[in-house]
Amino acid sequence: MDFFLLWDRILEYIDKNDHQYYKMFSYDVFPISLSDSTLVISPSRPYLVRWIDNVYKSKLEQIIRTLTGKDIRVEIRPPKSEDAAPAMPEPSVPAEPPEPPAAPFPESSEVSSMPPEPAPFPKTAPPAADPFPQEVAPPDFSSLTPKTADEVSLPDIRNYEDLHETSLFENVPKGESKKTFQPNPVNEEYTFETFVHGNCNEIAYQAAYAVAQTATHPDQADQKMNPLFIYGPSGLGKTHLLHAICNYIHKYKPNLSVLFVSSETFTNELIDAIQNHTMPKFRAKYRNLDFLLIDDVQFFGSRDSTKMEIFNTFNELFDKKKYIIMTSDRTPSDIDKLEDRLQSRFSSGLVAPISPPDYEICCIILQKRAEKMGITLPKDVVDYIASHINTNVRELEGAFNKLVTFSHIKKEPITLPFAREALKDQIPIDSGQELTVDFIIDTVCKYYGVKKDKLLGNGRPKKIVIPRQIAMYLCRNELHESYPTLRDCFKRKDHSTVLYACERVENDIENDPQTKASIEAIRKMLHSR
């Protein structure tokens, strides 16, 4: 079986049967080579090497056996950066928080389902063998004397649960108490500094940063942004912002309690608590927080068992002026089967949208990724990818990763012809698509991430009206169709609607740089097919 075809089929199997791990394998694990007996893979992060080897290696070999009928061993090769074991962080006083980053932002992969990095060993555990031992003077035990039974302080049984709850973030300043909760699977690479922001996501970015800053400046807290509800299509960076908030607070105020979970995790823990009669522990975990972050809350609408609990949890945290941050792929009012009282709670703060990235943002993301990896990415390659893949940051990064992997395996430099060949399954070569009204409408819908039936309908929301007017303008200027013809194509009652749309877009091109840039990007998509 072809090397890349086998890896694609492995990913399809994981997506279907172990969906919670699909994003990790798709974006953080790269195939290196395949022989008759061995498949070599390389995770991009050191801790994934240990996790895959201990948890999923045998499952991968079973998947390969199912797909090929052969016993092929999986070899896991550490990333080049893992030359030495990372040192444990020393306790330190947090630095003063920086000013808001001038122009940064994320890579957009969703990691809420990724397995967390194993917690460090307790300090009382026997130390592992040091590959580079140093000569250290033995401690002096001569002055120690054994304690009697009366002198030994035993733990209070009421604090039993606390004995088993530790935090990965041990650098708590002296004099500040620390609340103990299980460590969260937070990706330390997802920060506000690595989040690329622009017109498509500026509101959500600034709101998330402002909420994070309330940890260090509580006197500036604005309850108008509580809760913060971030919504938009999948793959645009919503989860990245949740990780960024967690990382900011862990860095500057590690004594605060922050819990980041997916709606699935919340529901599963609730079911487990009900079945095992541990609801007091569950409620103590979720209702004694400073910040609660929940990803993909749209799934709460179809789960009756969680509605009452999330409602009561929300109310208690809100009454204590604690922050709730949520993400969803739709607005609260658009979540099916979500009760009115939850809709009103979710909408009571700031509802911040994230839209598909425009051409400029896609170019910046590609350039930052290449710079981070030390790769030279020619401008024409950046332009080619950004012009064709600009509705989903995750797809954009997937295309970049595939291009880099192909270049590494084939040992060829990245050029425009090489990029066309490597990405031909995502960007068809020489499709021969005729420039028609339907093709222009489809291209505009893809660029703005809207459905065609909505664009051709009678809805008047701004996110539909602007793409509709731009599509009319492009059909008029690219095809020179008459106003009556376009009236019929766009299902309008009067051709004056098309005339007004064209005049409006022409005016916006002259006065609004963003509209001008969008028109140019769509034209590139139309003519580079």
Image (spheres, rainbow, N blue to C red):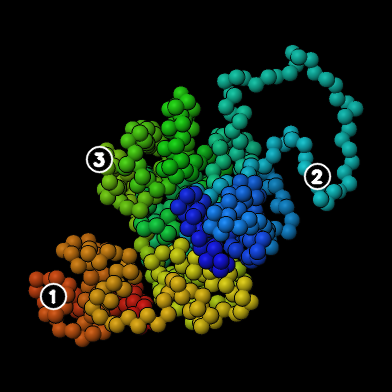
Q: Position of residue 427 (x, y in %)?
A: 43, 74
Per the image, label 1 sits on a secondary structure element best described as helix
Q: Residue at x 23, y 78 (%)?
A: 437
Per the image, label 2 sits on a secondary structure element best described as loop
Tag nearer the camera, 3 or 1? 1
Q: Residue at x 47, y 25 (%)?
A: 276
**Residue position marked by numbered label 2 in the rendering:** 129
Q: Residue at x 34, y 74 (%)?
A: 518
Foreground pick, 55 / 519? 55
Q: Is residue 284 above or below residue 116?
A: above
Disc 1: CA contacts within 10 A as few (<14), some (14-19) or many (>=20): few
Foreground pick, 271 / 321? 271
**Residue position marked by numbered label 3 in the rendering:** 340
Per the image, label 3 sits on a secondary structure element best described as helix
**Residue 488, numbered circle:** 1
Q: Give the spatial CA distance, label 1 vs label 2.
A: 77 Å
The quarter of the picture where the C terminus appears is bottom left
Q: Is residue 211 above or below residue 40?
A: above
Q: Residue at x 65, y 65 (%)?
A: 35
Question: Amino acid type of disc 1?
Answer: Asp
Disc 3 and disc 1 in contact, CB within 8 angstroms: no
Q: Give the spatial CA distance, label 3 vs label 2.
A: 59 Å
Q: Position of residue 146 (x, y in %)?
A: 83, 20
